[in-house]
Amino acid sequence: MSFKKIIFLSFLVLVTCSEEKKISKKESFSNAVRNFEMCKTDYEILYNQKPTINVKNGTKKAGLAKNISDFLRSKCFDTYFGNWEGKETKINQKKGVEFTYIIVDNLSDSNLDLINELNDVLGLKLSIEIKYPECNYKHLDECLKIKKNSHNNFTLVLGGNIIKK
């Protein structure tokens, strides 16, 4: 076999493999989008809104927020994560936050439904901190007299009790 034929066949194999990878990446992305759209929490089915949970690591265990965030994503929640830098009064300097809790803007039936669903998924009984208790069971925009995004803010602060699960 001549040298030119070997070069040509090698080139042909590389181009063919490259095209297959492009198709595979496009299919993977399409599948991911389709799976995301089909995956729904009970809350989303009931309220036609995908809940987004801000998962914060209040413990000293590295990577916990990412792991819990990934777990919640596998259960159809939309999440992002980081480290808790909130109220120092709730943090034990040696151990971090002791008990996992959730922060919501105000209490409403829909917020309570989401909290109950998270309790079931996580196997916990979350305590609740309310940012605007004066707005409980009222429309938040009207109560606060501000233009705010239409979605509630949900922050899940991970405490030491979740490590034991």
Image (tube, rainbow, N blue to C red):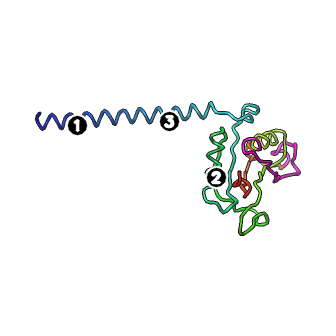
Question: How packed is label 1: few (under 14 Cα within 10 Å), some, or many (20 or more)?
Answer: few
Q: Secondary structure at mark 3?
A: helix
What residue do we see at 87% from left, 43% from top? Answer: 138
Q: Secondary structure at mark 1?
A: helix
108 over 62 or under it: above or below: above
Question: How packed is label 3: few (under 14 Cα within 10 Å), some, or many (20 or more)?
Answer: few
* Relative image position of residue 83 (x, y in whole percent): 65, 59
- What is the total number of numbered labels drawn onto the structure image? 3
Amino acid tagged 2: Phe
* Residue marked by disc 1: 10
* Relative image position of residue 3 (x, y in whole percent): 12, 38
Whether 142 is among the magenta residues is: yes
- Tell me the tag on residue 28: none
Q: Residue lying at the far bottom in this picture: please name it.
A: 93
Amino acid tagged 3: Phe
Which range of residues does the magenta coloring cover?
Answer: 119-143
Horizontal side of 34 relative to 159 (left or right) equals left
Horizontal side of 69 relative to 25 (left or right) equals right
* Relative image position of residue 129 (x, y in whole percent): 82, 53
Q: CA distance from mark 1 to mark 2?
A: 46 Å
Q: Are marks 1 and 3 in contact (CB under 8 Å)?
A: no
- Tell me the tag on residue 29: 3
Viewer-proximal residue, 128 or 48? 128
Q: CA distance from mark 1 to mark 3?
A: 29 Å
Q: Are marks 1 and 2 in contact (CB under 8 Å)?
A: no
Q: Earlier in the sequence, mark 1 or mark 3?
A: 1
* Residue marked by disc 2: 81
Quadrant location of residue 85? bottom right
What residue do we see at 68% from left, 51% from top? Answer: 55
Horizontal side of 162 relative to 133 (left or right) equals left
Q: Secondary structure at mark 2?
A: strand
Amino acid tagged 1: Ser
